[in-house]
Image: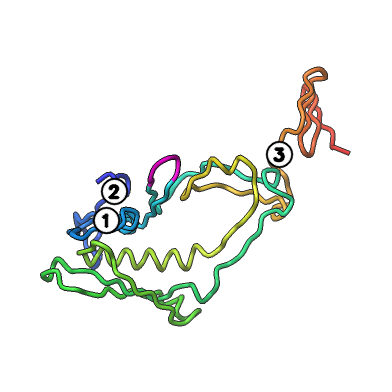
Amino acid sequence: NGLFVGVNGALNDSNGNPTKEPRFACNALIEQRQEAYDLLYNLASIFNGMVYWGFGGVSTISDKPKDPVMFFSNSDISDDGFNYADSQKTTRITTVKVRYNDSADDFKSKIEYVEDADAIRKFGIIEKDLIAFACTSRGQAQRLAKWILDTSQNQKEVITFTTGSKGLYLRPGDVFQVFDELDNDIKIAGRILYLDKVLGKIKIDILWLTPPGSLKYKS
């Protein structure tokens, strides 16, 4: 049950009617021995999450709204700067088939089909077929398909950069903010390069600050 803390909640069913159905539910009978990590990976897939090893143990994360935990500007990264890339159009899924066992129909195997009409007109038919682990609800299967479509169509930009020890504090799934001064033509953050306690000056990567606040551009 600990895997599902913070990701559950009642919502509408597959027909849009109010229901007490949990957002995520696990209905499985595990009878065969298997690799522990593989089983944890399958369990995490139920709530659109992932499993990773770090800090001496196994942790799970879920795809849900989060507040940024860190901020990166050009002063925090190498001279290569921020690099941007879009996902390939051939990977932007437009239709999804989710296989599940329907508890409302004697747990028979069913397929829930969901498509993105706008994406189909733009990219054509790019289908994904998957089995929803431990899923016995049509509504949950439909939500999984919609999540896949939404992720594929809207989370399509990738940013890469090289940073220092600051990046060690990030964990998989963390949200961070980026301010690229090359895109905004302004600098709002910097790094302290030198502190002169005798003269009472702080040297940063663009300015000299002298109490009580006079500014001088670095030559």
Label 3, label 2: how many angstroms apart (C-alpha)?
A: 40 Å
Residue type indicated by callout 3: Gly
Residue on which disc 2 sits:
4
> In the rendered image, which quarter is residue 88 located in?
bottom right
> Can you say whether 180 is above or below 127 in the image?
above
Tag 2's secondary structure?
Answer: helix
> Does 74 sit left or right of 21 as displayed?
right
What residue does disc 1 label? 24
| Quadrant in which residue 212 is drawn | top right
Q: Residue at x 69, y 55 (%)?
A: 183
Mark 2 or mark 3, which is nearer the start of the sequence? Answer: 2
Secondary structure of the residue carrying tag 1 is loop
Q: Which residue is mark 3?
A: 190
Q: Given the image, on which type of amino acid does mark 2 rest?
A: Phe
Residue 134, image x, y percentages: 23, 61
Pointer 1 and pointer 2: residues touching (CB < 8 Å)? yes
| Residue 55 part of the magenta segment | yes
Q: Which residues are magenta?
A: 54-59
Q: Badge 2: few (under 14), some or many (20 or more) residues near its Cα, within 10 Å?
A: some
Q: Position of residue 206 (x, y in %)?
A: 79, 39
Numbered badge on residue 77: none
At mark 3, the secondary structure is loop
* Residue at horizontal 53 percent and vertical 65 percent from the top: 156
Give coordinates of residue 73: x percent, y percent: 66, 46
In this image, 91 relative to 111: left or right? Answer: right
Instruction: Decide if residue 29 is on the left or right side of residue 78.
Output: left
